[in-house]
Each structure stands twice: as C-alpha cells, then as structure tokens.
Amino acid sequence: MSSPSAALSAPVPFPRPLALALMCALATLFAANHVAARVAFDSGAGLLLAIVLRSGVAALALAMLVVAQRKALRLPAGTGGWQLAVGLLVAVQSLSLYSAVARIPVVVALLLMNTLPIQLALLSWALGGPRPTARAALVMGIILVGLVVVLDVPAWIGDPGAMGPGWLAGVAFGLAAASAFAGALWITEHRLAAMGSTLRSLLTMLTVLVAMVIAGVFGLVPGGMALPQSLPGWTGLGFLALCYALAFSVLFICVPRLDMARNAPAMNMEPVAALVLGYLVLGQALSPVQLAGGGIVLAGILFLGLSRRA
C-alpha cells in the first residue's frame, strides 16, 4: 500500500482527452521531423549533419532538464558498457531511419520502423523471454501481410526497376532501424532499469552526437556532412531539429501525466501524420491498395499494443 505522502507527491494524470490530443500532436511533430529531413536531403544535406543537429538540440534540452531537476550524474555500477551500447544502437537507428527516409516515401519508412513491436517480441523470446502467444503471432503475420501490400512487393518482383534504384536499400534501412531500436529497448529494460531516465536519455543523445561527429570527421558516410544547396534545405534542417527536440522534450516532461499504459497506442498517429504531411509538403502519395495495407499494419500494431497493456 502506498503512503499518503507518496500519493500526494505522485503526478496527477491529465484528463484522457487532453492526454490523447497531446500525444497525437507529439506524434505529428515526430512525423514533421522526418518530412523536414526529406526536404533537407533532397536539397543535398548530409545524413550525418541532420543527425548531429537533431541530437545536439535534443541533448541541450535534456541537459537543461538534468540541471533543472538537479539529477545526480552518476551511473549505477556495471551499467557503463550497456549505456554505451544503447547510445550506439540509437545512433545506428537514427542513421538507418534517415537513410530510409532519403530513399522511399516517408510514410513507408515509418511503417517499416513500426515493425518494432514484432522485432522486440522476437528478440525478447530469443534471449529467454516469453514466447509470443498464438494470437500475437497471428497478428504479427497479418502486419507482415500488410507490409507486403504497402511495399507493393508483387510489383517490385515483376519489374524491380519500376520502384526506383533506392527502393530495396530504403526497405532494408527501415527494417534495420527497427532492429537497432529493438535492441536498445531490450537493453534499457533488462540492463538499465536502475538508471534514471533523464540521465539515460541525455547520455544516449550525447553518444549519438559524438558518434555522428566522429563518422563525419573520418568520412565514414560519403557526403554525410554535406551542406544543403538551397534555402528549403536549410529550412528543412532547422525544422527537423526543432520538431524533434520539442516533441522529445515535451514527451519526456509530460510522461508521468500521460498514463502511457492506456494511451501509448496514440503515438501510432505518426505514420498517419507522415502520410498527410508527405502529400502536402513532398507530393508523396500511396495507391489505394497501399493505403489499405498501411491501415492493416496500423490496426495490427494498435491491437498488439492494447493487448499487451490489457
């Protein structure tokens, strides 16, 4: 039983309509970050430059939170290596996802990223966790069928050239982004649970920042630090950093009052927002059949999320 003082100190959750509206707004900001990134890439901006700016602004916001909350800058014993691994995995995830966004429609890249629940469940099972239930396995299969429709795999098999030269690489990068983030989440849950979330997030962003700077200095990604060649490119860079840092910071601050156990599926609004923004800003559009496949993917992910919380 919790003490009266603990009950008084616990944050009061937002009313559910407000929490859902806020989370949908944050999902839209995350989607806007990826659309802005595509604008920057189309203007010649390098992948590493985009991630450096995004991670730098986010790290600055987190550092301000750490100072404001007077958090201790100490790592629990034995967690240093695991924290470094999480930071490097998030760096790989960031680079892979932006690489996918640069090659295929933004909404398709985000739907591939949303295979995360499947990959995390399989990874947890492989590492000794519970086996997915028959119902979960069925839903995962339905999600994969939806992805086959979204990616228009039959058309690619019939005429690989019709999908564009970057299609296959974009799909691979999107799936790799989900795999890297699944690994980061597994480590966070099983090896870093004792570490404060503010410090963990700050160290993760700093690791991503340093990794991208090192990759740029040594030229590990050709053109990775290239500057945009037009004003829209610079504008895209500014918006991607601003949208990501704002969404990340507000989400981080408000998490104790968002009742994530009930409301987290609202974050699956991101691909929907990306679809609308991608059409309005980039002129990217999916066929009716692909839209139906995307609906199948989102419905399956929502079902998995709600079932897990239930």
Image: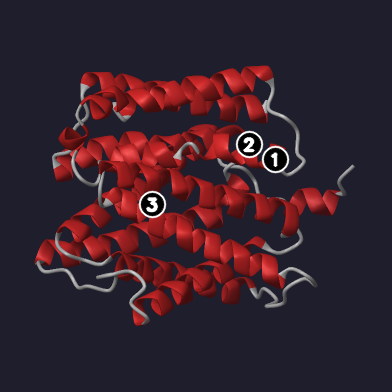
Q: Which residue is mark 1?
A: 126
Residue 68 as seen in the image, left or right of residue 38: right
Quadrant containing the C terminus is top right
* Three-letter code, disc 2: Leu
The secondary element bearing badge 2 is classed as: helix
Q: Are marks 2 and 1 in contact (CB under 8 Å)?
A: yes
Q: What amino acid is found at the position of numbered circle 1 in the picture? A: Ala
Which tag is nearer the camera, tag 3 or tag 1?
1
Q: Quick check: 102 above or below 70? A: above
Q: For residue 97, which numbered disc appears in the image? A: 3
Quadrant where the N terminus is found in the figure = top right
Horizontal side, residue 18 vs residue 10: left or right: left
Q: Earlier in the sequence, mark 3 or mark 1?
A: 3
User: Which percent across, then down, holds residue 306?
Assistant: 59, 26
Task: Report how far apart the C-alphas of labels 3 and 1 lie in the structure.
Answer: 24 Å
Tell me what residue is drawn at x 81 percent, y 52 percent.
Answer: 6
Please give left or right for residue 294 compared with residue 120 in the image. Answer: left
Q: Secondary structure at mark 1?
A: helix
Residue toward you, 218 or 275: 218
Residue to which mark 2 is pinned: 122
Depth check, front residue: 47 or 34: 47
Position of residue 222 in the picture relative to residue 202 (left or right): left
Q: Nearer the viewer, residue 11 or 97?
A: 97
